[in-house]
Amino acid sequence: MPFEKRGDEPLDAVINVRLTKAEKARLLEDADLAALSMSELVRRRYFGRPILANADQAMIRELRRLGGLLKHLHNETGGVLHRDTASVLAALKAYIERLSHDRQKD
């Protein structure tokens, strides 16, 4: 009995692969980061499908939140530290764009 289906086809074939304990631990960690089963992670990697790490999505949300707080601080202080806040906001924006771009490449 298949566990899942891919389109109309059931996933009913099984392969066994020998790994070191370290390799298996790395696969499990990668699967956890992407919120996927190890099987789905291996299928996506082998067949060139995208893998998006949940950590990246959470990181982007947190960076945007920090940017919003920094912008609020800038506005509340009347821009007293405008050079500093501007450079930090630019760095946050660049990092968010890089993470988003890296995610789209995958």
Image: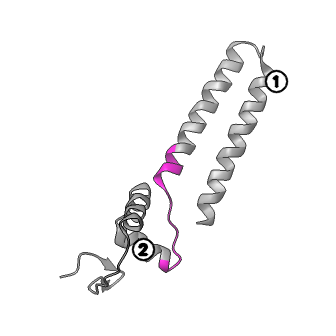
Amino acid carrying label 2: it is: Val
Give the color scheme: rainbow, by chain, secondary structure or one colour: one colour
Q: Is residue 100 left or right of residue 14?
A: right
Q: Residues within 10 Å of mark 1 (few under 14, many from 20)?
A: few
Quadrant occupied by the C terminus: bottom right
Quadrant occupied by the N terminus: bottom left
Indicate whether 90 appears above or below 14.
Answer: above
Report the residue marked by disc 1: 83
| Residue 12 is inside the magenta segment | no
Q: Quadrant of residue 88?
A: top right
Closer to us: 26 or 46: 26
- The residue drawn where x is 43% and y is 55% is 33
> Magenta residues?
46-58
Q: Is residue 12 left or right of residue 6?
A: left
Disc count in the image? 2
Indicate whether 46 appears above or below 28.
Answer: below
- The residue drawn where x is 37% and y is 67% is 24
Question: Residue 15 appears at what percent x and percent y?
Answer: 31, 85
Q: Is residue 84 left or right of residue 96?
A: right
Q: Is residue 89 left or right of residue 9?
A: right
Closer to us: 15 or 10: 15
Q: Using the numbered discs, state the Cα–Cα distance from disc 2 to disc 1 in whole angstroms.
A: 47 Å
Q: Which mark is residue 42?
A: 2
Q: Residues at badges 2 and 1 in contact (C-beta under 8 Å)?
A: no
